[in-house]
Image (tube, rainbow, N blue to C red):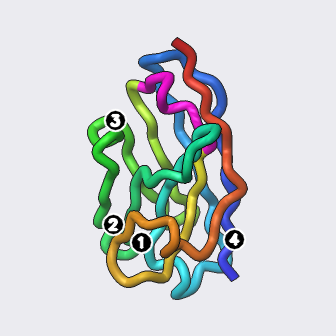
Amino acid sequence: QVQLVQSGGGLAQAGGSLRLSCAVSGRTKGSDNMGWFRQAPGKERQFVATMEWNSEITYYADSVKDRFTISKDNAKNTLYLQMDSLKPEHTAVYYCAASSTSGLTASRYDYNYWGQGTQVTVSS
């Protein structure tokens, strides 16, 4: 059973930065790909970024490309999302997720395990 525990997030001003962390435990075949999603009030959960755990190949949503960076620390078994040049429209609850799907995927339906979510609020 894969467990994902998130930390980080909070409040930032427009143009500022935040970093989210996702500690991964019980990692098995079921977490070949790790991803970040976000959900704003009244909207569907939306893909942000994903990384293939072993190869570290990454893929980003167009809306966050060149602003957000997904990375990992193997020693800490932790996934990160560095968010720079933040905008108010980046305000949402952010979730990390693990998928056993072969190959990178941006579909939330391919992710089997989810973190508890963390609020990110960007003020103008």
Q: Which residue is under mark 4?
A: 3
119 vs 79, left or right, is right
Q: Earlier in the sequence, mark 3 or mark 2?
A: 2
Q: Nearer the viewer, mark 1 or mark 3?
A: 3
Coordinates of residue 92 in the picture (x, y in percent)? 59, 37
- The quarter holding residue 22 reads bottom right
Q: Which residue is under mark 3?
A: 67
Q: Earlier in the sequence, mark 2 or mark 4?
A: 4
Magenta stretch, residue numbers: 86-93
Q: Which residue is under mark 2?
A: 56
Q: Which residue is under mark 1?
A: 53
Marks 1/4: CA–CA distance: 15 Å
Residue at figure coordinates x 66%, y 31% from the top left: 10
Q: Residues within 10 Å of mark 3 (few under 14, many from 20)?
A: some
Label 2 close to label 1 by CB (< 8 Å)? yes
Label 4 close to label 3 by CB (< 8 Å)? no
